[in-house]
Amino acid sequence: MDPRTGMPRVGMVGGGQLARMTHQAAVPLGQTLRVLAESPDDSAALVTPEVEIGTHTDLEALTRFAQGCDVVTFDHEHVPGEHIRALVAAGHLVYPGADALQFAQDKALMRERLAALGAPVPRYAVLPGAADRDPAATLAAVVDFAAPGWPVVLKTARGGYDGRGVWVLQDEPAAAALLAELGPGTDLVLEELVPLERELAAVVARSPFGQAAAWPIVETVQENGICVEVIAPAPDLDGRVAAAASRLALRIAGELGVVGVLAVELFQVPVSDTAPDGILVNELAMRPHNSGHWSMDGAVTGQFEQHLRAVLDYPLGRTDALAPWTVMGNVLGGPADGAGAGIGMDERVHHLSARFPEVKVHLYGKAFRPGRKLGHVNVLGSDLARLRRTARLAADWLSTGEWTDGWDPHTAATTAAVPFIERTGR
Amino acid sequence: MDPRTGMPRVGMVGGGQLARMTHQAAVPLGQTLRVLAESPDDSAALVTPEVEIGTHTDLEALTRFAQGCDVVTFDHEHVPGEHIRALVAAGHLVYPGADALQFAQDKALMRERLAALGAPVPRYAVLPGAADRDPAATLAAVVDFAAPGWPVVLKTARGGYDGRGVWVLQDEPAAAALLAELGPGTDLVLEELVPLERELAAVVARSPFGQAAAWPIVETVQENGICVEVIAPAPDLDGRVAAAASRLALRIAGELGVVGVLAVELFQVPVSDTAPDGILVNELAMRPHNSGHWSMDGAVTGQFEQHLRAVLDYPLGRTDALAPWTVMGNVLGGPADGAGAGIGMDERVHHLSARFPEVKVHLYGKAFRPGRKLGHVNVLGSDLARLRRTARLAADWLSTGEWTDGWDPHTAATTAAVPFIERTGR
């Protein structure tokens, strides 16, 4: 308890944008998020006064941090399981626990656990990363796995994200070259390249008490392995498929004992024996997730508030959508030397508001770097085509300082009629 | 500019809940609110890392604070005008400016300025507070003002709030007693006791550029001079009256040169020569205001974000409501020895979420004190009677730790069916 307020102290390991947005959600709950950040300039460290500097792999730093918290949770999945177990053994509450989190840390464990549960997953094989792994035998296993046909997908079991650590292998020579580059010592997961129609995500939250809540199933749109757009709810999704996806995510959360937000990334594929509902699990994330950012503006309870409620074992909030559609667009750092490079983020926000006063901006306070997630935008309403266009234009503008449709504020007609807004004064 | 982020630094004088909620709104805009607080335990100082300790009447503290800000604004209206002018003379941007803010600081000035603008105001008279004010002459002026009939209303021109500094005088002896108690030296405003039907508020925001935006007109419900409930939009309000009220507030914002949020508190009264639209101006507030708290959850752009946009001269955000109705309930500290006194706020939030998972909680991190504003709740939807009941029950529960309808979680049926929520796990 914070003696000043009588409210609980949640600590989040990691000072990235997820922690930043969790602090934003903590404020109305009467709380102050504590953050273990690598640097005082980390995204979350810029906005909360309760910052400790330290690294998530340093058990001493974690222990010191946990001593000031009623419950510890995570901005990312990189805290070693043995450190989490040590914190729990020392009497700290840590959610999600190590037993759950391992399935978000290791894709090989995740595939095997989900397969054991009978959850729909792509055909896969695990290549254990023994230090003495025989290159020829490993290649033979890949070739064997690819017998039904190339290409196949190879992933590192640990450490990949946003498309990193994932390769599509077109043939045996490509596989041989990659395996030589990766060397032994890294667990690998082979997967079939699924006949992907699109990607979906089922985001849920679960409390220690066992209550769970699901947001509507969303469609996620990736480019170069990075999510660029989320549409809530997923357009034209069969109601039975949506219900199956929600049930699947709730079941995974329960079976794995997840506490907090769980995002289940899904492939939508043709119905088959292995995908009876037309969905296959791609990956799991046990924290607030990019596919849930829409909920900050588009749902009664956003994912960051829900994550706090869950780890505090509060009853969960309603997850209903506030509008027929919400579209999220990611703001990724554009090329540094683009035409808009001279236009700072402050000025970009200014111009964005002038053109699209309905867009909700979420900026992470991060320095520009090409491809880096700098923020996102949400926009909600009833005209999906227009919302998607607005979100994309807005995100691209904030990313690059360029209007990709060639819009020019100096020649454009003034913004479409905005009710309740007028120019006043002398 | 904050060199770490390239984003502007807004500073707010005062560390109360309005600053706290402004920081919450600053985070998604990529900013960190700077706060000049009286104490490190102030509501806002608990949630932002950028805190300076100092008093709003200390020009040195204000000057030091302003040097770290791109623009300075206010959590309250108590900064002396000459200090604001000194800051501006030293080259700082301060919004709202002293010329505008004086009308929110001094009810006598406000009445005279609005009357000069032809804005509808109650019949009034100003009793200047000269130190040598003759008690007999002052009483005679009150009696003269009351000639059409007692009771009349007497207000101190400066310093009153939440019903303090306002008295209803029933007769001449009461007036004599109060004047004797107040003594000379305080400007007083006499007003007719208007034939009040209900109270409304028109909340708008205006930027230095002169753009202004209005939220829907709301009804405010007071008890003992303190706002306890706000209904957005005001039920059964004639569209022409609503439009007149919005136009009036936008006109006042423009004529007075307000920058930031302006709340115009209104009396709804029968139509008359002095109230041709059935509204009279009660008071002005030039900052985010209790009557605008509903917009945090109920409108596309909440008043705290809009205030930041306005003082930064960003284009303003859309003010559309997200649901047919939003109801705000104030959480006021209840009697310290009530039956719920042993139930801490953490536990109250827990139980509230169990009963009403749709309620949005906003807590200010303040220690309990009877009558103190500790937080508010918002709830939105389409069934107004139910929303009002929910907001009232929720606010009373958080205030007192008692369900005023006698609800008992141990005997009550489980919460009405909540879609997407179920119990999971082993």
Image (cartoon, coloured by chain):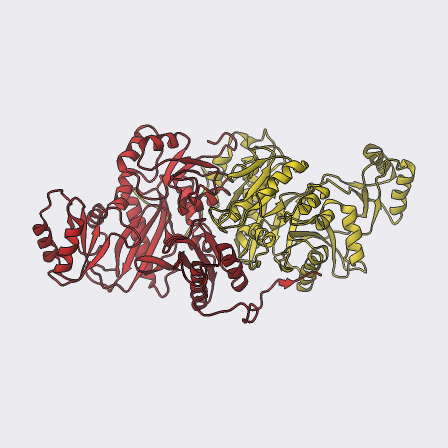
Chain colours: A red, B yellow
Number of marks: 0
Say left or right for A296 vs B396.
Answer: left
* Quarter residue A275 falls in: bottom left
- Of B117 and B345, the residue lying toward us: B117
Counting from the top left corner in percent of width and height, residue A324 is at 45, 62
Residue at 54%, 49% (x, y): give it: B8
* Quarter residue B315 falls in: bottom right
| Up-down relation of residue A165 to residue A237 (above or below) | above
Counting from the top left corner in percent of width and height, residue A385 is at 43, 68
Counting from the top left corner in percent of width and height, residue B418 is at 42, 50
- Of B35 and A321, the residue lying toward us: B35
* Quarter residue B313 falls in: bottom right
Say if residue A281 shows up in the picture.
yes
- Of B2 and B258, the residue lying toward us: B2
- Of B219 and A140, the residue lying toward us: A140
Say left or right for B190 vs B363.
Answer: right
Counting from the top left corner in percent of width and height, residue B149 is at 86, 47
Quadrant of the rendering where the C terminus of chain A is positioned: bottom right
Say if residue B403 shows up in the picture.
no
Say left or right for B17 vs A361.
Answer: right
Residue at 15%, 46% (x, y): give it: A184
